Amino acid sequence: MDNPTEQIAKNVKWFRSEKGWSLDRAALETGVSKAMLGQIERGESSPTISTLWKIVKGFNISLSSLIEEPAGKGIEAVTIIRDAEEIRQQFADDEMLLAPLFPYDPEVSFEYFEMTFPTGYERLSAAHKRGVIEIVTVISGSMEILSGEEWHPLKSGQSIRFKGDRPHGYRNHSGADAVALTVINYPERK
């Protein structure tokens, strides 16, 4: 896998080109400044997870589309094994580690991540694209998920499903890292 900053730079530039958008139009659609988008495309800036989500929402694409090499064709009749140890990475100043185990595939309309939340971690997330659903399963440690107005405590083995198209959040005040598997389901694209 390429350096995350380099891969994101390639992908943002490619998606903007595919849409035929100028930097001004991309800034308008994403809410990310023209200057910042230019820095991202040139590989001069490593965007935060929050900035990546703004780009994803504005371009109407999945998160893994920005951080992974294009997968090419959809799921074939083949078995695929991916190792989180090999693909786990950190973005910009966000302390969370992210491993895109199975990037977005239009045939199944979801992407699948391993997420490691260090102790003391807290992030509020803006609403994603309309219709997005998230499912989080804690596989080690404990953490909390904000859905609606309430923080929901989860321990190893527990899962939560919530609407990702509303503001939500993740926090770990447990004193040890928490690792979770996350499915992000996107509505059908038109």
Image (cartoon, grey):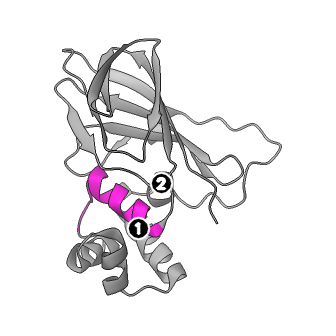
Mark seen at residue 16: none
Q: Residue at 24%, 70% (x, y): give it.
A: 44
Magenta-highlighted residues: 45-59
Nearest the viewer among 168 and 105 is 168
Q: Position of residue 41 (x, y in %)?
A: 34, 74
Q: Quadrant of the C terminus?
A: bottom right
Q: Give the residue furthest to the front.
A: 149
Nearest the viewer among 96 and 163 is 163
**Label 2 crowding class (10 Å Cα cut-off): few <14, some 14-19, many 20+?**
few
Q: Estimate the spatial distance between the alpha carbons at disc 1 and disc 2, rounded to whole Å.
A: 12 Å
Query: First in sequence: mark 1 or mark 2?
Result: 1
Mark seen at residue 58: 1
Q: Residue at 28%, 69% (x, y): give it.
A: 31
Q: Position of residue 12 (x, y in %)?
A: 42, 70
Q: Position of residue 57 (x, y in %)?
A: 42, 61
Q: Is residue 69 left or right of residue 90?
A: right
Q: Is residue 1 visible?
A: no
Hey, what amino acid is under mark 1? Gly
Nearest the viewer among 20 and 9 is 20
Q: Which residue corresponds to mark 2?
A: 130
Tag 1–tag 2 contact (CB < 8 Å): no
